[in-house]
Amino acid sequence: SQSRYIAVEIIYGNKSEKVVLHEKASGENLYLTPTGRFFEADFLRSPLKSFKRISSKFSNSRIHPILEEKRSHKGLDYAAKLGTEVRAVADGKVLVKNYSESFGNLIAIAHTNNIETRYGHLLKFSSNIRVGDQVKKGEIIGYVGMTGLATAPHLHFEFLENGKQVDPRKMASMSYALDSNEKNEFVNTTTQYLKALEEFKDLEKL
């Protein structure tokens, strides 16, 4: 069977942060801080610092502006000026950087806890972005365009959990990963895991 870490302490510079395993009832494994937050810093509320408006919301059925037929729209469209900087909404690894017939110049980024974000219709990519690269929250990854099937400059942004698109507006609540039924169990297991971590650290000092 595959081994798993139940608790780790991550040290960077003169700072450190503890992360513990949480096993959800669905079988999904999450790594959270002891307060129940995702280990990654909170997701940015938007991949754009400035935009005109949200021109198309997440929907299971809408009339496509070019194809003029009903199709699902599994993301948010941010209408913005051509060339507006597009930022990674959290730390992650570049999975895809290519041209899609529908979404034009497209970047996909994998984050922790089986989360992925996608950025489409880009005018161009940042010159230093390559598949496999680690990117930081807020890092510029490309620029708003209208490549692919687009009628005006905008960013098509998708947010996926476990490979399934969900409304990107859910990002605002991604700081906390636990529902009320999970909190007590998480507190109990976290106490045990952190105790085991401290005992392990003591053993290493011997």
Image: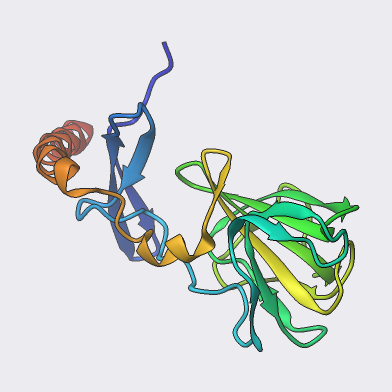
Q: Position of residue 14 (x, y in %)?
A: 33, 66
When the figure is inspected, residue 146 is found, relative to residue 109, above or below; the finding is below
Give me the residue at 25% from left, 48% from top. Answer: 178
When the figure is inspected, residue 126 is found, relative to residue 54, above or below; the finding is above
Give me the residue at 64% from left, 53% from top. Answer: 109
Give me the residue at 17% from left, 35% from top. Answer: 193
Of residues 177 and 55, the one nearer the viewer is 55
Q: Position of residue 137 (x, y in %)?
A: 54, 67
All told, the count of numbered labels is 0
When the figure is inspected, residue 84 is found, relative to residue 32, above or below; the finding is below
Task: Name which quarter of the figure residue 41 lies in.
Answer: bottom left
Of residues 27 and 56, the one nearer the viewer is 56
Q: Which quadrant would the C terminus be assigned to in this image?
A: top left
Observer able to see residue 128: no
Q: Residue furthest top?
A: 1
Q: Which quadrant would the N terminus be assigned to in this image?
A: top left
Observer able to see residue 16: yes
